[in-house]
Image (spheres, rainbow, N blue to C red):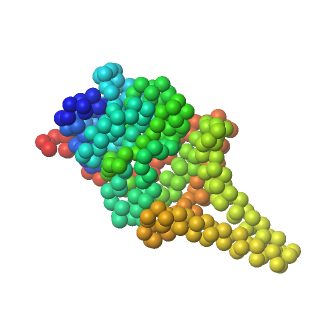
Amino acid sequence: MQLFTRKIGIVIIGRNEGERFKRCLLSVRDKTERIVYVDSGSTDGSITFAKSRRVDVVELDMTLPFTMARGRNSGFRRLLDMKPDTEFVQFIDGDCELVDGYLESAVLAMMNHPDITIVTGRRLERHPDASIYNRLCAIEWGKDLGEIQSCGGDMMVRPEPFIAAGMFNTSMIAGEEPELCVRIRKAGGKIVRIDHDMTIHDAAMLKFSQWWRRAIRAGHASAEGCAIHGRSPERHNVRAVLSALFWGVSVPIVAVGFLIAAVWWPWAVMGSPITLFGYVALAAKISRSMRRKGFIAFDARLYAAACVLAKFPKSLGIFQFWLNRLRGRPSTLIEYKQASAGDVGELARSDH
């Protein structure tokens, strides 16, 4: 183990990830002894497997509302309670496998630039060709390098500024990472993506219904982030929310309105296809943008079509957030993944 990696801690969150969790834990166990696994009610033997590998386990009280933010914060606190001298903490989701060499590169970036609070790397998709939905995940993972505005859940943080910023917002069911990044940047910290593969993710998204629910969750996240920071100078998520509502609600209403008006004014029927042509124009614009970023034509068109179609479920997520808020009800987790096949409890009883 490299000398400068001895004070790296790793926090893993997961539930019923099965083989995915096995790969995740095996990819990190030789990197550091400071590993905490936070489990949110697994029934597949994940806890037994983690304990068999001498990993500290936090079992969340599932009578309380669960969020990934709550899981990450709980793991972070346990880690620092055990090892208060921990200098860097890497968060990783239980469906991801850590890439060799990333931790060393991330630590070097932190050591060379004290103003960096969060370091991330490239997230890769394990099976991008298993479905168009997996392929969309592979396309959308951030590829911009250097200083960035926000990142996903796989990240390395410097504990002191992370704590000072208030850690993750445990009330958010999704989108807690960009919301944290807003607060980090307000405090003067930087978020940087280094030129190194970080994790291999297993989306396991094979059905349209999974993609649809994931898009609903994204809409909910955008709405909640906007509600928290939308009035700040950067107007966090305002554009994303307005775009979803315009294309997912306003344009269809206008198109239907033209059809209704055609009952009295036959010429109005032409307004409907002209209005709907806006979706084609939007997809073409997104596709051109993706091509300029270096994506092949098929991926650019696939991503563009998905972005346009996602306006509808995202609008549902936005309405869901505001309806719950008006009723005073807490939002509950919107899940789209299926439990991984295989019982990792069997793996805990074997020597790997």
Which residue occupies 43% across, 65% down? 295
Q: Quadrant of residue 108?
A: top left
Residue 39: image x %, image y %?
35, 36
Left-right relation of 19 to 302: left
Measured along the vertical axis of the image, is residue 21 above or below residue 250? above
Total labels drawn: 0
The percent position of residue 299, horizontal first and vertical second, equals 44, 67
- Left or right side of 160 for 2: left
Residue sitting at the far bottom: 266
Give the percent coordinates (x, y) of residue 296: 42, 69
Residue shown at 32% from the left, 50% from the top: 197
Residue situated furthest front in the rendering: 112
Query: Would you identify the image quadrant in which residue 182 lies?
Result: top right
The residue closer to the viewer here, 280 or 288, is: 288
Q: Is residue 169 left or right of residue 116?
A: right
* Residue 95 vs residue 155, the one in the foreground: 155
Residue 17 location (% of width, % of height): 33, 46
Q: Name, please, the residue furthest toward the left.
A: 351
Residue at position x 39%, y 34% from top?
113
* Residue at the outermost right position: 264
Examine the rendering and report whether any part of residue 130 can be seen.
yes
Q: Nearer the viewer, residue 136 or 313?
A: 136
Q: Does residue 40 appear anywhere in the picture?
A: no
Q: Is residue 247 above or below residue 18?
A: below
For the N terminus, the quadrant is top left
The quadrant of the rendering that contains the C terminus is: top left
Q: Residue at x 27, y 39 (%)?
A: 104
Q: Say which of 24 and 179 sits in front.
A: 179
